[in-house]
Amino acid sequence: SQTIHQWPATLVQPVGSPLSLECTVEGTSNPNLYWYRQAAGRGLQLLFYSVGIGQISSEVPQNLSASRPQDRQFILSSKKLLLSDSGFYLCAWSVVGYEQYFGPGTRLTVT
Amino acid sequence: DQQVKQNSPSLSVQEGRISILNCDYTNSMFDYFLWYKKYPAEGPTFLISISSIKDKNEDGRFTVFLNKSAKHLSLHIVPSQPGDSAVYFCAARDYAGNNRKLIWGLGTSLAVNP
C-alpha cells in the first residue's frame, strides 16, 4: 500500500531563516506530487505541483520554491522566511489525476 | 474567482441526525467531484467521489448527490456521529483544463453534538 511521509511535524523558525520541508511517497511510481498551504482558518491553497522529476509548476508567486530530485521525493524550500509564510503545509500525491492523498502535514511558525 | 463554493462556513447537527453539506460550482467542464474530511493538525482524508455521469454515489453512511443542471452537489452523512466533527472540503477536477489539479472549496466545519 502507498504511504506518504512529511517531516518535520512542527517547526519554529525566525524571520529571514531558510526552510526545507521534505515529503516522500512509498508504494507508487511516477506520482503527481503537490504542496499545499493552509493558513489559519482558511482553505487549501495549492503552491506547487510536479508531474515528474525536475518538473515543477508554480501556482502562486511567492517566497517559496519546490524541487523534485527523485521520483518520490518533493521538497519545499525558502531562502528567507517571512512572517506570512506561517501555516500548515501539506504534501499530497495522486495518480491518473483523480483522488489526492495527503501526508500528515508540517506546522510552520515563523517568529 | 471561487469556482467551487461552500457557502456555509459551519454546520451544527445533533448526533444521530442527518448532516447535509453543500457545494456549488461554476465551471460546467468539471467532470469529477470529491469530498475530503479534515481534522485539526492533520492532512485531509479522501471520503467519497462522484463522476459527472452519475447523480448519486453511496459509501456506508456517506452519500454524495450531484445535480449538474444546478451545478450543485451535496454530501449526506446518516446517521451523524461525534467523530464526524471536522472540516469538510469539496473539490472538483476540470477535465478541459489542467486535470492534474483539483479546484477546492473553502470548507465547511461540521460539529456533531452528542
Image (tube, coloured by chain):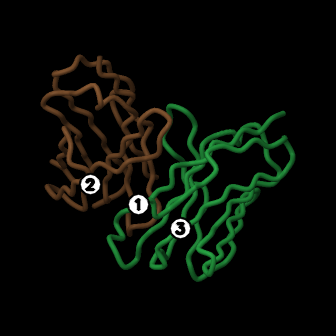
Q: Report the mark closest to the observer, 3 or 2.
A: 3
Name which residue type carries label 2: Glu
Q: Which residue is drawn at 46% across and 32% down?
A: A40
Residue A19 image offset from top left, x and y in percent: 20, 29
Find disc 1 in the rendering and name its residue: B1
Give the Cα separation between the discs numbered 1 and 3: 11 Å
- Compare residues B71 and B38 and report the one nearer the observer: B71
Question: Is B44 positioned to the left or the right of A37 in the image?
Answer: right
> In the figure, the brown chain has which letter?
A
Against B67, residue B58 (above or below) is above
Image-quadrant location for residue B34? bottom right
Which dot marks residue A59? 2
What hue does chain B carry in this figure?
green
The furthest residue to the right: B16
The furthest residue to the front: B1
Against A8, residue A35 (above or below) is below
